[in-house]
Image (cartoon, rainbow, N blue to C red):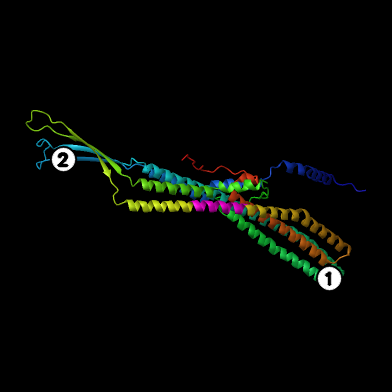
């Protein structure tokens, strides 16, 4: 019996201790947290350039509201009156230095109506911005699901290639020993080569989807390649009536309602502008004492009211008011059409999402499990000589295709849920926490 050198014993003990302690050390090392959909939506809300553009346009609408209600600037007059040709101010009793002020006013509320109408347009801009926010969230969800699904398909192709490597090695060993056929070996080699193409294609799809996702997150394409958590598949089982009521509060419906109110307010303001406007004037004249006069001259003041009579403008203002009223009716029809369209789309998406969830569950829990068992059985039969390699290749190919179908079903389900998020604008229905808008829209009482 030979005695092992002490160095070998120490090295062996060290390796055994590393094997025992290694998993414990790995448990203590913090792993990078996978990127999830909620984090993506937070970044989209804060950094998406398209959404930022809509928010700036909403600020423009609010600035127009302030401008619509502003009064005209007053007119300040500085002048001299009745100055003799000689240029002296103490020769004629009517010579004065005059300071005057003039202000145009609309006493019948046309400016207030115009400002309220502009405020409604600003609220419509806020609603449009909110609607775009949900649309961008949906686009980010789709891009996220596409990237995750393509990554899963690439992983499935890589794992299946390992199975094909094993089969090709077994087929080659049998062929070289004279117990196998050449066609079986060639089929295994061809299947393994095809998987290389599949993996390359799926990887390209993943990178393209990640580039779209990076753009929505306000990042340069390919800036990072974080691991992605599985997209959510939960959906609130609310009643049909509750889902239908969501359409009435959607930002697109609110925007149409605000546009309708704005056009009706503009029509009222235009009609009110047909009423007379007033111009208030006041002036003060400073007079100099005359040469040789025994008494000082009093200063003089003037005041007056001018009335602007809109004679001849009634037909034009009436046409403009009729135009605004027609646009208001169009906005009302648009609002009802939008509400009905959203309700119908919500119903259709819910039905399709329920069916796709059922398909994904059947593929994951039944079909794929059965195909994997069939592959194990076919491989056992091949190793025992009961079946040929063609049966094993067929079972492996079927199992691989079912894995791909499962990832595509989950990708399609994510697309349906993302669109449903856009048409409901209610993240809690999907178990998601969406951040508050980066710039909260104003909701002033009108």
Residue 369: x and y in percent read 79, 55
Outermost residue toward the right in this view: 1
Which of 270/416 is in front? Answer: 270
In the structure shown, which secondary structural element does the residue marked by tag 2 occupy?
Answer: strand
Based on the picture, tell me whether residue 334 belongs to the magenta stretch. Answer: yes
Is 425 on the left-hand or right-hand side of 441? Answer: right
Mark 2 or mark 1: which is in front? 2
Q: Nearer the viewer, residue 341 or 276?
A: 276
Up-down: is 394 above or below 19? below
Residue linked to disc 1:
181
- Picture coordinates of residue 346 (x, y %)? 61, 52
Query: Height in image: 10 above or below 323?
Result: above
Task: Report whether residue 226 is seen.
Answer: yes
Give the residue number, with chain letter if any, for mark 2.
81
In this picture, which residue range is highlighted in magenta? 332-346
Q: Is residue 277 above or below residue 320?
A: above
Q: Nearer the viewer, residue 233 or 172?
A: 233
Above or below: residue 89 compared with residue 142: above
Question: Do tag 2 and tag 1 residues touch (Cβ < 8 Å)?
Answer: no
What's the CA distance linking mark 2 and mark 1?
120 Å
N-terminal of the pair, mark 2 or mark 1, is 2
Q: Is residue 59 something one can see in this rendering?
A: no
Residue ID at (50%, 50%): 256
Looking at the image, which residue sits at the far bottom? 182
Residue 221 painted magenta: no
């Amino acid at each position: 019996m030979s005695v092992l050198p002490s160095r070998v014993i120490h090295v062996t003990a060290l390796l055994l201790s590393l094997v025992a302690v290694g998993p414990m050390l790995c448990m203590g090392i913090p792993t990078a947290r996978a990127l999830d959909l909620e984090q993506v939506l937070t970044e989209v809300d804060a950094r998406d350039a398209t959404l930022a553009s809509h928010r700036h346009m909403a600020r423009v609408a609010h600035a127009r509201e302030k401008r619509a209600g502003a009064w005209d600037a007053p007119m300040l007059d500085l002048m001299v009156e009745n100055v003799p040709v000689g240029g002296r101010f103490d020769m004629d009793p009517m010579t004065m230095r005059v300071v005057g002020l003039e202000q145009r006013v609309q006493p019948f509320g046309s400016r207030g109506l115009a400002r309220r109408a502009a405020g409604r347009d600003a609220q419509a801009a806020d609603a449009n911005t909110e609607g775009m926010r949900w649309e961008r969230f949906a686009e980010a969800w789709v891009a996220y699901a596409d990237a995750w699904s393509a990554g899963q398909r690439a992983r499935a192709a890589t794992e299946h290639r390992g199975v094909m490597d094993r089969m090709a090695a077994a087929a080659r060993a049998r062929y070289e020993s004279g117990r196998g056929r050449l066609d079986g070996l060639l089929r295994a080699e061809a299947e393994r080569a095809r998987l290389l193409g599949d993996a390359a294609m799926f990887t390209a799809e993943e990178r393209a989807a990640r580039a779209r996702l990076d753009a929505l997150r306000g990042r340069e394409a390919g800036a990072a390649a974080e691991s992605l958590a599985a997209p959510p598949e939960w959906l609130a089982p609310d009643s049909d009536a509750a889902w239908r009521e969501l359409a009435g509060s959607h930002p697109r419906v609110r925007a149409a309602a605000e546009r309708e109110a704005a056009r009706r307010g503009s029509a009222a303001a235009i009609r009110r502008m047909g009423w007379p406007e007033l111009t208030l004037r006041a002036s003060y004249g400073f007079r100099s004492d005359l040469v040789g006069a025994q008494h000082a001259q009093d200063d003089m003041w003037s005041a007056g009211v001018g009335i602007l009579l809109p004679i001849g403008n009634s037909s034009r203002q009436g046409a403009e008011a009729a135009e605004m009223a027609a646009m208001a009716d169009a906005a009302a029809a648009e609002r009802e059409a939008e509400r009905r369209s959203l309700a119908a789309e919500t119903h259709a998406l819910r039905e399709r999402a329920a069916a796709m969830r059922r398909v994904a569950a059947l593929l994951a829990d039944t079909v794929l499990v059965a195909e994997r068992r069939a592959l194990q059985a076919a491989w056992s039969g091949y190793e025992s000589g009961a079946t040929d390699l063609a049966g094993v290749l067929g079972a492996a190919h079927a199992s691989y295709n079912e894995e791909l179908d499962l990832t595509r079903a989950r990708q399609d389900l994510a697309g349906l849920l993302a669109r449903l998020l856009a048409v409901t604008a209610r993240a809690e229905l999907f178990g998601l926490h969406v951040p508050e808008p980066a710039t909260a829209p104003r909701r002033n009482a009108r």
